[in-house]
Image: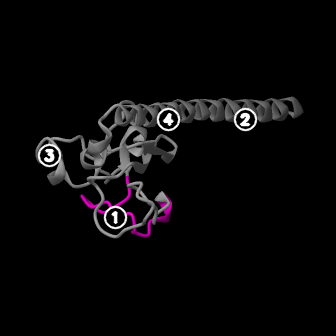
Amino acid sequence: MVAFLVMSVAVYILSSTVTASVSHSIVKAEKTLAVEAAMNTIEKIRAMPQADIFALHNSDPSDDPYGPGTGPGNTFDVDGLERIPGRPSVGTILMPGTGAVLDESATQPEFGLPRDLDGNLVIESGDCSDRYIVLPLTIRIEWQSRLGPRSFEIATMLADLAKWQE
């Protein structure tokens, strides 16, 4: 009887360990996909003309430089990651401003605003989406894992150094 009890406890501990290991592997694989997607998105954005980045990736498709609705927008999906129910996508590109307006005097602490974005050493109110030199952005990946909702965020700062020297 004692041997049976010891064996039952050992099997329970072993099965719990195996289950936790499998769950950890799944979460780790999903997070790897999220990190790769975020880094790839940042690299794609960096490869674009600096002057077009805000217009192509803000939430307003009417200001796209090649015609309304021609830009990729601020959302994207990631192969291998499932959308959270009710969400339009897995990935989101977050930038300062509202819609097509980039106002360096806005109070958006998540982007370090107010901040001089156009390099004139003055924080001005009004739209500077046509003359910014520095552009903070965040890539957020949110997905539905087998273990519940998960997320990953990475922030970066884009700078047009050639324009800065002008």
Which callout, 1 or 3, points to the residue nearer the camera? 1
Q: Residues within 10 Å of mark 3 (few under 14, many from 20)?
A: some
Q: Is residue 146 magenta?
A: no
Give the CA distance from mark 2 to mark 1.
59 Å
Residue under label 4 = 35
> Of residues 152 and 12, which is closer to you in this image?
152
Q: Quadrant of the C terminus?
A: top left
Q: Is residue 103 magenta?
A: yes
**On the image, which quarter does residue 70 sit in?**
top left
Give me the disc on residue 69: 3
Instruction: Using the image, determine if residue 43 lies above or below residue 64.
Output: above
Give the CA distance from mark 4 to mark 3.
27 Å
Which callout, 2 or 3, points to the residue nearer the camera? 3
Give the CA distance from mark 2 to mark 3.
56 Å
Which callout, 2 or 1, points to the residue nearer the camera? 1
Query: Dots 2 and 1: beta carbons under 8 Å?
Result: no
Residue under label 2 = 12
Give the CA distance from mark 1 to mark 3.
22 Å
Q: Residues within 10 Å of mark 2 (few under 14, many from 20)?
A: few
Which callout, 4 or 1, points to the residue nearer the camera? 1
* Secondary structure category for the residue under label 3: loop
Name the amino acid type tagged 3.
Gly
> Of residues 19 and 109, which is closer to you in this image?
109
- Residue 90: x and y, percent? 36, 43
Lower position in the chain sequence, tag 4 or tag 1:
4
- Judge whether residue 66 can be spotted in this image: yes
Give me the disc on residue 103: 1
Name the amino acid type tagged 2.
Tyr
Lower position in the chain sequence, tag 2 or tag 3:
2
Residue at horizontal 26 percent and vertical 54 percent from the top:
59
Q: Residues within 10 Å of mark 4 (few under 14, many from 20)?
A: some
Name the side, left or right, on which 29 lies relative to 131: right
